[in-house]
Image (cartoon, rainbow, N blue to C red):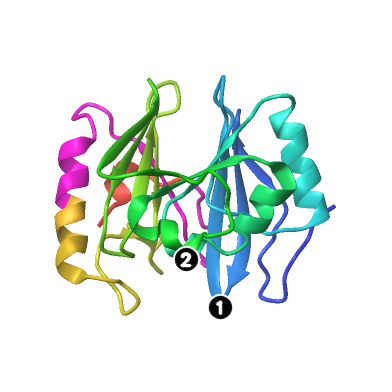
Amino acid sequence: MKIVLSLGVDTSPKQIRDGLWTFSKIVGGTFQKSWWLDCNPEPVMIDCPELSANTIEFLKRLAADRAPKIILTNREAHFGATHLHKALGWQVLVQEQEAYLLPEIISLETFAEEYEISPVLRLLWTPGPTPGSCVLYAADPWNVLFCGRLLIPTKSDKLSSFPNRSSFHRTRYQKSLQRLRDWIPSNASPALASGVGSMCQNCVDLYEWKDWV
């Protein structure tokens, strides 16, 4: 069943690739996106999707008998995370600067600068959009960078790397962008999965590395 909000955003899960799904929602007038990556042995839910009975059941089917991890890339993506954790019992991982925002989550997992979830999944702290902003790089066979609010769509259907009015700290933002360029393997050029959606017509879900402006 397709669910469409009043602003025309389809909140139904959308499969982008084999094992990669995206979920959309509106929070405070902002079009947010979350992502499911079906990697073994531990899938990951990147940011919090729209909470509904249908979404919970769908995620249970995707997880099967596995124990996925919920990764929160910025404080704007926390909305509903506690309820999602309680409904599914999945562990939540967040950068330590924003752990205090989730007091009801039992055994909250945190990291500081960098964190390796598995040989193909790595996290990098990228403060600037929010104090605990981070990105997740999924190496081959995925080669996707889940960039949260660090890179967001523009009207020209590119991804912007410039701080905006809601950014926490402009200087840290710019330093995080440079650190990200140095951190990503030089031969990778990953696809980019933003945590913010675009309202443009014919908008894409995954951007190319060269679409970062």
Visible residue check, residue 183:
yes
Left or right: where 56 falls relative to 90: right
> Magenta stretch containing residue 159, yes or no?
no
Foreground mark, 2 or 1, reads 2
Question: Image quarter for residue 70?
Answer: top right
**Image mark for residue 149:** none
- Position of residue 144 in the picture relative to residue 58 (left or right): left
- Residue 115 screen position, x and y as percent: 33, 35
- Label 1: how many Cα within 10 Å (few below 14, some 14–19, many 20+): few
Residue identifier under label 2 = 76
- The residue positioned 14% from the left and 67% from the top of the image is 171
How many residues crowd mark 2 within 10 Å: few (<14), some (14–19), many (20+)?
some
Magenta span: predominant SS is loop
Q: Nearer the viewer, residue 19 or 28?
A: 28
Q: Earlier in the sequence, mark 2 or mark 1?
A: 1
Residue depicted at 26% across the width and 58% down the height? 127
Q: Residue 126: x and y, percent?
A: 27, 52
Q: Are marks 2 and 1 in contact (CB under 8 Å)?
A: no
Instruction: Tell me where residue 102 appears, x and y as whole percent.
Output: 51, 59
Q: Quadrant of residue 167?
A: bottom left
> Badge 1 is on which residue?
29
Start and end of the magenta stretch?
178-205
Task: Find residue 202 and report its horizontal and vertical position in percent.
Answer: 55, 58
- Amino acid type, residue under disc 1 in the picture: Gly
**In the image as oriented, which residue stretches furthest toward the right?**
1
Element on which disc 2 rests:
helix
